[in-house]
């Protein structure tokens, strides 16, 4: 079986992942570790974009669901959390020698560039990692959806979703010891089995535009760098026709 290698990817990292065991804010050791893992992939010559969430600082849906805030305001606050995470990850990457740019979907020109697609692609061509912050810039859309949107815009070969588990299972492996992991699965099978790969809007966009997804655990060393070289890491989610080729 021929290994599938990727030249341009987008990595979706949750804000919660940056918090580590403390559960809130940014854990410095986790931040440094993630920068090192991204660098290993960068050193392979892969063009990398990253979309980072903001759940380690703020989840807009929590207060809006409780009626404390209007959903629009709550989501805008969440966007600011993603900008803080992107700036932190930028600094961590620069410390390990990776040139990086942050682009924001909302205007914060004193700390980040505005998102401009042509400029983002030019950064990639100049071997810079591009960090996309502030989601889509609109309320009611998750950072999963933002990740898919940006991946499609930059024409990424694959979207990598970093989670707490090492792939997609038939049921929650954190609750069920007999959960079975899928090494490869089609979009339609994931839909039929109601597997929570990502939120429905984001997943539907991947399906409609044939954007493959690899779900993996970034907390395990060398997962990302191995996956981009075609090693059997995590779970590969794609069209059945694409799935048959790998």
Image (cartoon, rainbow, N blue to C red):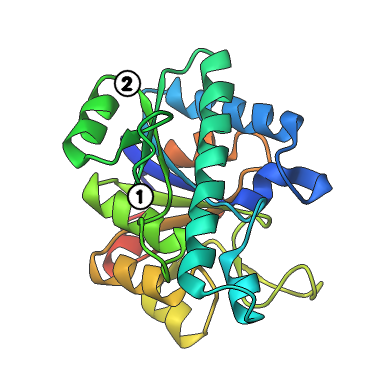
Q: Residues within 10 Å of mark 1 (few under 14, many from 20)?
A: many
Q: Residues within 10 Å of mark 2 (few under 14, many from 20)?
A: some
Mark 1: which secondary structure? strand
Location of the C terminus by quadrant is bottom left
Mark 2: which secondary structure? loop
C-alpha distance separating marks 2 and 1: 18 Å
Q: Mark 2 against mark 1, which lies toward the viewer?
A: 2
Residue occupied by mark 2: 127
Q: Quadrant of residue 128?
A: top left
Camera-side residue of 67 and 201: 67
Instruction: Check the image and report above or below for 188 versus 242.
Output: below
Which x, y percent locates residue 111? 43, 29
Q: Earlier in the sequence, mark 2 or mark 1?
A: 2
Which x, y percent locates residue 97? 50, 12
Q: Residue at x 46, y 58 (%)?
A: 143
Q: Is residue 68 visible?
A: yes
Instruction: Check the image and report above or below for 48 versus 244.
Output: above
Q: Is residue 232 visible?
A: no
Q: Which mark is residue 158?
A: 1
- Residue 36 in the figure: left or right of residue 106: right
Which x, y percent locates residue 67? 62, 81
Q: Quadrant of residue 138?
A: bottom left
In this view, the residue farthest toward the left is 118
């Amino acid at each position: 079986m021929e290994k599938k290698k990727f030249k341009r990817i987008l990595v979706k990292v949750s804000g919660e992942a940056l918090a580590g065991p403390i559960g809130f804010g940014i854990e410095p050791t986790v931040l440094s570790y993630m920068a090192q893992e991204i660098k290993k992939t960068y050193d392979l010559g892969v063009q990398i974009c990253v979309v980072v969430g903001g759940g380690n600082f703020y989840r807009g849906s929590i207060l809006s669901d409780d009626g404390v805030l209007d959903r629009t305001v709550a989501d805008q606050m969440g966007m600011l959390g993603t900008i803080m995470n992107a700036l932190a990850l930028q600094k961590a990457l620069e410390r390990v020698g990776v040139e990086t740019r942050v682009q924001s979907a909302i205007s914060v020109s004193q700390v980040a560039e505005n998102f401009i697609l042509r400029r983002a692609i030019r950064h990639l061509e100049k071997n810079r990692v591009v960090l996309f912050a502030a989601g889509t810039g609109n309320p009611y859309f998750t950072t999963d959806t933002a990740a898919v949107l940006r991946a499609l815009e930059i024409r990424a070969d694959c979207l990598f979703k970093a989670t707490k588990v090492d792939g997609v299972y038939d049921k929650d492996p954190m609750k069920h010891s007999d959960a079975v992991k899928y090494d490869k699965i089609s979009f339609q099978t994931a839909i039929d089995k109601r597997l929570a790969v990502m939120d429905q809007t984001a997943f539907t966009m991947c399906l409609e535009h044939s954007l493959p997804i690899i779900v993996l655990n970034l907390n395990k060393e060398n997962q990302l760098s191995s996956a981009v070289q075609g090693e059997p890491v995590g779970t590969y989610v794609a069209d059945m026709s694409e799935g048959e080729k790998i």
